[in-house]
Every structure is written in C-alpha cells, then in structure tokens.
Amino acid sequence: MAETKMVSLTIEGRAVSVPEGTTILEAAKQVGVLIPHYCYHPGLPVAGVCRMCLVEVEKAPKLAPSCATTVADGQVVHVHSDKSLDARKGVLEMLLINHPLDCPICDQSGECELQDYTFQEGRNDSRYREPKRFNPSEDFGGDIVYVPNRCILCTRCVRFMDDVAHDTVLNVSERGDRAVIGKFEGKDLTNVWAGNVVDLCPVGALLSKDFLNKARAWELDRAASICPNCTQGCNVMIETRENQVVRMRPRPNEEVNAFFMCDYGRLNYRWMNERQRAETPLVKMNGKLVAADWDVAVPAAAKLLTGNRAHIVASPMLSNESLYLLTQLIDTSKGAGVFRVAEGEEVPLPGVEDLALRRDRAANVYGAEMLGFKKTNDVFAGAGKGDVLVVVGEDFDGLDASSISNAGDVILIGPAMPNWIAEKAAVVLPTTNFAEEEGTVTNLRGRVQRFSQAKAAPGLSRPTWLVLGDLLGAIGKQSQFFLPSDVFGKLASSREEFAGLSYDKLGFKGLPVLNAKAGAA
Amino acid sequence: MGYPHVPHQKETPVLTKHFGEAEARSLDGWKKRGGYRALEKALGMAPADIVNVIKDSGLRGRGGAGFPTGMKWSFMKPGDGKPHYLCCNADESEPGTFKDREIMRWTPHSLVEGCAIGSYAIGAETCYIYVRGEFTEPLEHMNAAVKEAYAAGILGKNAMGTGKRVDVHVHKGAGAYICGEETALMNSLEGRRGNPRIKPPFPAVSGVFGMPTTINNVETLAAAAPILINGADWYKKMCLSNPKSTGTKLYSVCGNIAKPGTYEVVMGFPFKEFLYDLCGGPLPGRKFKAIIPGGASVPIQTMEEAEATIMDYEGFVAGGSMLGSGGVIVIDDQQSMVGVIARLARFFAHESCAQCTQCREGTAWATKIMERIRDGEGTMEDLDTLLEISENMTGKTICVLSDSCATPIVSGIQKFRSEFEALIHGKKFHPVMAAVA
C-alpha cells in the first residue's frame, strides 16, 4: 500500500495530523471537536447542503462547509468563532421557521439533532411572523411514516436509498420551501434495509411505525448487544423501557455492519419480551413436574446424566460460553451435540461490502459449528434408546410431541417450555434469553462479539452459562464460574481458535477468531 | 422592439449585425454573410494557437461572471486520457435578459460555429448546447442549424473536409432558472435533478459525466468567430475605457423605457447615453427611478449611480452594481420599489433548488416579509430582519441564487429606504401621487 501523506493543521487551537483527503469535519472529530452538522453522515456520500457545518478557515474568503472541505497543510480552523457561530445560528433559525416545534409530541424528542443544536447554539426566539408551511404526514410504506413539517431536507434518506440500498424510492420533490421528500410513483419503502432511514433522519421527520409513541427517548435504557436474528452479527443497541424491549437500533461497527441493520433483525425483538415460559426449576416427582429449588433441580438433572449418554440439542442462539460448557457435557457423557437453524432468503445491502441479512437466522451458527455441534434438520434423530435428551435454548418452533416420542429422559434447559414437552421433561431448568444474559457470539466471518444484558429475566431464571456451569459441577467436573468472562477465559485457554482473546480485548467491537474465514468472497 | 431593427448609429453591431434578416438563419444565408470562414480558419490552426488568440483578445465570459475566456479554455489539458466536453450555456433565464435568445433566434449558425471553434480549441469530445426549456422558437432554429451543419459536413467526423471530428448536440432543458448555474446545468444534462454541485471540484476537473468540462455562455462562444476572422487586436481595440474589458457587449433592455430591445455597444460606453439616447429615455411624462443593469441578481442602481456608470465589467462595479448578464431592467417613478423587489424575491423563492437551508427557507421568508411590507402590513423591525436574513443568505451556500435574492433586497433597502418606510407608516404607494411628487 502506498504511504498516505499526512496533513497537519490546527482546529480550535488543537494540532492534528490526518491523512490527505480527510475532511475538516472528520479531522475535528479526532481532536474531540464536534462540528454541528445535519446532512453529513460518514456512511453516505457528501451532499454539503444543510450548511450547518460552516467553519471559519483562516485566509479563506468565505466560511467553508467542513464536511466537503478537505484539510490542507497549515490550515487554521475556527469552529466556535463569532463568524461561524453566527452562520450556524442563522441556519438553525431558518430550519426552525417552518418547523412545527412539536417536540412534546414528537418521537425524536430527546434524541433530535435539531433540538440539541438549537439548545447548544441557536437563538432563543424566532423572528418569523408569517404562517408556517404545512404538509400532511404520509405513509411511506414498510415501517416508515413521513412527517414533512419536521423535515429539514438534509437528504440523508434519499442518499441512503439511492447510494447504499441502490433502490431509488425517495426523492426531493418540488423546489424552494415547497420541497418535501417524495416517493417515486408506485414505490414504497418496503426494502428490507429501508428502516435505516429512520436512524439516519436527524429530526423527527421519518419515524418507525413500530416504535411510534412507545416511549420518550429519555425513558429508554440501552444495552450494547448483537442482533441475534442472523449470522451477520450486526452490532446493535437493545433499548428497553420498564424492562421491555421496545426497539433495536444499529451500533456503528465498520468491520461488520457499518452504520446499518436490516428491518428483519430490527423488528424481530418481540420474542425477547415473551412471558409464556419456564420461570421456576421443575423436577418430575411421581409423574408430575413440581417446582423445586435450584439446589434440588440441578442435582436431579446431574443424576440423570450420570452414567448415561447425552444427546444435546443446542440452540444456535446460545453464547459461545454456553456452547463451550455443553461441549464439556458431551465429552463427559460421550454424547453428541446438534442444532437446527431457521433459514430465509439472503438479502445483501449493496452499498456496504459484505453486509447482508444472512440465510441462517440465528446469532451463533458459526460458533456452534466451530465448537463441534452438527447442523441437522431433525435434531432428535440421533437420540438413541436410553440416551438422556438435553434440550438447551431451543425455541421448539414447528416441533411437537411426536418428534421426541422415542426419547428417554428429557432435561429441558431454556426459557421456552411448550406444554407438550413439559409432559416429557424430567427436569426443567429455566434460563434467561438472549437479551437477558451476557456473552459472546461468533458471526459468519468468525468475528467474536460481546453482547450485554439488556433486561432482567422473570422468575427464578438464571443465565444459561451459570446453569450449565452448576450442572457440570454437580456431575463432578471441576467447574466454578462467577462471570461469563470466566467461562470465556476457560474457552480461550482450551480452544486454540479463541487463544489470546478476552472480554477486555474484544471490547464492544469484537475480534476475529484465529484463521477466521475471509471477508467478502 | 420588433425586427427588422435598424441599429442605432452609436451601436457597434458585431453579433447583432444580421439580426432581423431571416435569411441569415439558413446555412446558405449564413455562408453568404461570411459564415463558417472562422471555423475553416480555426480547423487549420493548432488548438493552442486559437486559445492564444482568444486570450489576446481579452474576451471575458458574457454570462455574468466575466472570467477571461482564453484562460478558461487553457485549463483544459488535452491528452489526459479522458473525454473532455464543451457546454454552451443557453439556459438564459435571468429575469430581464434575452440577448442569447436573440442570437439563437436570428443567427443560430453563429452559435454553432462558435461552439465548433470552442470544441476544437479545447479538444472536446462533444459540445452540448443546453437550451432553456421555455425557448421553443430558438430551440427550433438551433436544431435546424445543427442538422444543416451536419448535413453539409461542417460538423461530424470530417469537419469541413479537414479530417477532424467536431460534434455539437442541442439539449433542451426542462425549464428551471437554476439550470443556468453551470453545475446544475451539468446535472440536468446528465438527467439528474438540476441541483448545483459543490465546488471544488470545478468543471475543468470534473464536469459533465465527471469529465473535464468547459462551459461558456452563448454570447461568449458566438464572439469567438469574429475574433478569429478579424484578429485579437481588432477585438481588443473595441474598448472605450478599462483595457480589461474589450469587445462588444449585448444588452437586453426592458422595463419602463421608450425603446426596449437588444443593443450591442462597445465596452466602456457611457450608460447615461445608452439609456437616454440609444434606448430613447423614459416613457412620455415619466422619470427613471432605478436601474437593475445586469439581470435580476445584481444590486439595484439609483439613477445617480446609473448615469455616472461606464458600461464595462469594472464600470458597473464602480457604479455600485455589476455587469452581470447585461439584462437592463429599467424602473420608473410609476413603480413601487417595494413591489418590484417583492416580485424579484418571489421569483428567487420559486426557483430555489431547495438544497441549502439558507436559500430554501431564506428566499421564501424574505419574500413573505417583502410582500407583507408591500401590502402595508410591515413593521420597522422587518427591515432589520430582512437585512439580517440577507446577511445569512450571502456567501454561505453552494451557488449564488440565495445571494442573488438578497442583493436586490439589501440594495433596495439601502437606496430606497424611504419607500419602505412610507409603506410601513401607512402610506400606500400610489402611482399618480408618486408621479406628482
């Protein structure tokens, strides 16, 4: 690779050296200066239209749009000088003259860049005395509704659909202050990636119908996580209100999902709030399942496993930690581990390399395979007579009593517990679901990524890794873990693919396993 | 004024020489008048020599900015492996300007010839003539002329039998003022929405289809032929004042004046003489009040300023305005300045491409305030607000449309403040009363 030339300049009195061709706005970020902006987004082509990022560059005749101006040696940039502040104040005033100022009923309120910058450096009054422009809200199809009165015409949505999704649905219609975001005739925002325009919209003009009126931004708790709905492993924030997941939004990660996620993943979060589930450990006594303490139920399960071969059906939603502990159970009992995975159509996002809604619709298919679990359509077929069937984290979608009619004792570990399996189960150990525990998953390119707990689990449910650790201890294995990072440490020291990795090293952007599959083919 | 049009004796008809002669529209008629001799001469020269002649002539862009044409042509570096383009900006939509329209209406071949010379001089792959959508008649003449020129072998693979390839295409715009802005024109030509592009990159680096492009006004390109025939010195000598402004300039005069029309005078001609002598002065019983000398987007001149102005690039600046496109709008004492400015502002608000915030919102806001003042609903604070909005609209956007909207407002308030105040203080503008006063 040719050596990139570095350019040195001064921004707000801070010296910075950046590669040639960097914009002033990006260079400023590196020294901790956020230049206010609307139309600029690092994942989109530069438009330079909002004129919010105007800064003063010494010796330049006019204020420069910092998103579209590249750095030059010796440049001296003033972001907060009177001249630049006045210009931005002017832009903010103009953006607000036709804005309905309906923050109290706007979904974006609290996470609105128009609100933020106005508080930060806008005028505290308006000189606008004329009637405001009005346009009715419009259903854009898919999950999206458009509120033109709040729109600042930054065109991020148009550029996303054109240049990233390669699906020309949106445009700027009309001219002057009559301009609105329009939809081409016969088209709707039904593209599976279209939901990103809601995140991209800096104001409350493009809203998610799914999230509409569900919560105010400041009522939400946020947890850094991984979208569990396919093997891409898009980095996300799981947002909860009162312990209910109400929204998933992408978290930037250049290596995995840039700034985006698909609507399939985004909207597929309701199962995280599922209440029809096992909440208490259960043990079968006299042919009936009865509630038991953990210190009764775990030994009961251990007793079933002792001396028997275990056929383990694991969910590909399980973390590496849980799967690793299961491999130990397989080793001890000379058993086998299998999983099944729901499949769908692969839908790439053309504008981002190697980003797609993947065929396999579960988070940790690659991790499961790497740890020795076999993918199969009939997960119960391998269970021999007398084998103990251990079902972990399985959602039982599409399965019924007939599928396990041959099995011997069944140990059910997981959040889901359909009635028909309850009849077969000897022990039920309730665990938390993906959003309720912490761990790591490995995406299809072999990238190990951490997810954190977003909500509390109901009842006596415990994290899967904790339950499995206790179970291993109860059957006599040396096993005592207090944190998922402990389990991961053990995994890293015993599996060469994970060698050298730790929670601290992974951070919240993840790292590839050793000899990870290459990126885009 | 209609044609046939006898030029005033103080005019110097170079480009307007054959206006009114319907025969000049045809190839034969044009050839009879010496047409395509310049192209023939040009094709026998080295391109760089043509550029030098244009440079020496001192020809400057006639579209408004006045950039030296020869220098612009020399920015094109042949042999970089990319196709180069010449664009002819015939999207003449500046209010009050209709000089290019007349060139295309009467002497379409002069423009075809100029385009061919320009194309050859800069080594352009193709020349696109972007004709304003509303120009239905000029478009017909241009299409006919280009067709004739191809049929006669003047254009094409073997231009005038020299073995050199010169291609000219006519493209019809869809009718947007902003497409006269050079980069918006390029977007429109490419089939995109006519939005101005951020500069840099400038067209000479990345223009039409992302390739190096030169863009010239109709009048500029049409002037290339007579310069090549008569020589750079001949052109340079047509100068009555500042040597930086040479040659002749077409002015389209409209508004409250006795003889509106298109006039061609030498650079440096006195504006007072032009208005009162060539154009016949004010209408009977009226007095000039103000002049917008270069199309709607230049500052308004008071009569004192206008009468002291020398008509060239520097002279109009010294006179408090700009030469601009040469669209002279004359406003007399029967007009309300506030009304005129409100109408101009409405035009710009309507034509804003809606990209930049200050322009999209500012032009519309300023229009609403102007119209409110015009209707007697204004306040004194409105004047300050207008000046501040105008400040926010100036020099902060991608193109100069928003500056253009602010310009007449600011110069109007500065120079005709009493009219604004009278309306604000309840005195409705009354043309008869104004004439008496």
Image: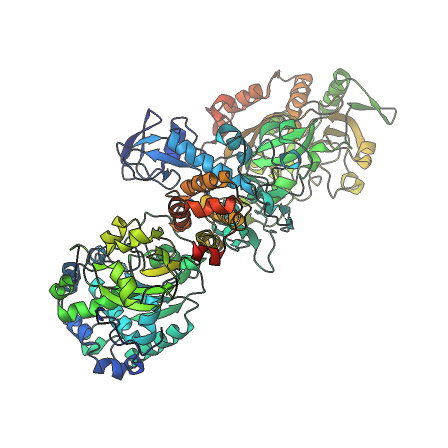
Horizontal side, residue A274 vs residue B131: left or right = right
Q: Nearer the viewer, residue B10 or A384?
A: B10
Residue at left 75%, top 21%? A460
Q: Nearer the viewer, residue A61 or B115?
A: A61
Work out whether B404 lies above or below A488.
below
Horizontal side, residue A405 vs residue A259: left or right = right
Residue A156 seen anywhere in this rendered image of the structure: no
Work out whether A173 lies above or below A476.
below
Residue B221 seen anywhere in this rendered image of the structure: yes
Work out whether B224 lies above or below A12.
below
Q: Nearer the viewer, residue B214 or B254?
A: B254
Residue at left 59%, top 31%? A110
Q: Quadrant of the N terminus of chain B?
A: bottom left
**Residue at the extreme left:** B233
**Residue at the extreme right:** A286
Horizontal side, residue A402 vs residue A390: left or right = right
Work out whether B437 lies above or below A472.
below
Image quadrant where residue A69 sits? top left
**Residue B429 percent location from the top left of the image:** 49, 53
**Residue B56 percent location from the top left of the image:** 14, 59
**Residue A45 percent location from the top left of the image:** 43, 46
Q: Nearer the viewer, residue A41 or B195?
A: B195
